[in-house]
C-alpha cells in the first residue's frame, strides 16, 4: 500500500488498529457501566455470578493486556515474529469478541462496538497474512 511516493509502514498501521481495538473495548465497557445494564434473566445472572472469580478476572486482564501490548510490540518486532503474533493474537481476540455476543443479552451499542472490534481485528489478521517480507522486495 502506497501513500504518494512513500510506502506505509505496516508496523505503524498495526499499532494504530490495535489502539483502535483497545479504545473500543474501553468505551464499550464504560457505556455498559454507565447504562446500568444487568443480566436480564435469572440464568444470565447465575452465569455472570459464577464467572465472577479472581481467576476469571485475571484471565480477562491478560486477554485485554495482550491487545495493549500488541500496540507497542507491533512497532518494534521484526517482520517474522511481528507477522505471526499479529495473526495469532488478533485471531484469538476476534474469537473472544465474537463469543462475548453470546454470554448475556446485549445492548445495541455493545453489539455495535463488538462489530467494530471484530472488523479491526480481522483487518489485522488479513493485513499481517498478506505482509510480504520487506527484505524479499
Image: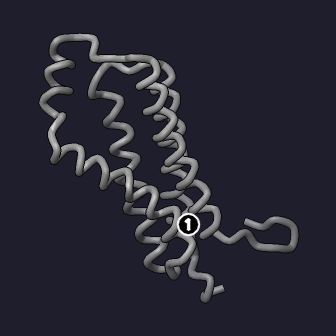
Q: Does residue 30 appear to the left or right of 37 in the view shown? A: right
Report crowding for label 1: few under 14, some 14 to 19, many 20 or more residues within 10 A (C-alpha). Answer: few
Quadrant holding the N terminus: bottom right
Mark 1 lies on residue = 130
Q: Which residue appears at 46% of the width and 22% of the height?
A: 34
Question: Residue 10's spot in the image, x, y percent?
Answer: 63, 68
Eyeballing the image, is 25 above or below 37? below
Eyeballing the image, is 110 above or below 5? above
Return the residue found at the far top.
Answer: 41
Question: Residue 75's spot in the image, x, y percent?
Answer: 57, 72
* Closer to the camera in the image, 30 or 93: 30
Question: Residue 99's spot in the image, x, y percent?
Answer: 31, 36
- Residue 134 falls in image quadrant: bottom right
Q: Does residue 61 appear to the left or right of 124 in the view shown? A: left
Quadrant holding the C terminus: bottom right
Return the residue found at the far right.
Answer: 4
* Closer to the camera in the image, 126 or 17: 17
Question: Residue 56's spot in the image, x, y percent?
Answer: 19, 44
Q: Does residue 38 appear to the left or right of 2 in the view shown? A: left
Q: Which residue appears at 24% of the width and 50% of the height?
A: 59
Q: Does residue 6 appear to the left or right of 20 in the view shown? A: right
Q: Which residue appears at 33% of the width and 44% of the height?
A: 96
Q: Which residue appears at 43% of the width and 56% of the height?
A: 67
Badge 1 element: loop
Eyeballing the image, is 66 above or below 21? below
Amino acid at each position: 500500500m502506497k501513500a504518494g511516493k512513500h510506502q506505509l509502514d505496516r508496523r505503524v498501521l498495526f499499532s494504530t488498529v490495535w489502539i483502535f481495538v483497545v479504545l473500543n473495548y474501553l468505551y464499550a465497557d464504560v457505556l455498559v457501566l454507565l447504562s446500568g445494564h444487568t443480566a436480564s434473566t435469572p440464568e444470565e445472572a447465575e452465569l455472570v455470578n459464577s464467572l465472577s472469580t479472581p481467576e476469571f478476572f485475571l484471565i480477562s486482564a491478560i486477554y485485554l493486556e495482550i491487545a495493549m501490548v500488541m500496540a507497542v510490540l507491533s512497532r518494534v518486532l521484526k517482520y517474522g515474529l511481528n507477522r505471526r503474533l499479529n495473526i495469532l493474537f488478533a485471531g484469538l481476540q476476534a474469537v473472544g469478541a465474537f463469543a462475548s455476543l453470546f454470554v448475556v443479552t446485549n445492548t445495541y451499542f455493545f453489539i455495535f462496538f463488538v462489530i467494530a472490534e471484530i472488523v479491526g481485528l480481522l483487518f489485522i489478521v488479513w493485513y499481517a497474512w498478506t505482509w510480504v517480507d520487506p527484505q524479499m522486495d
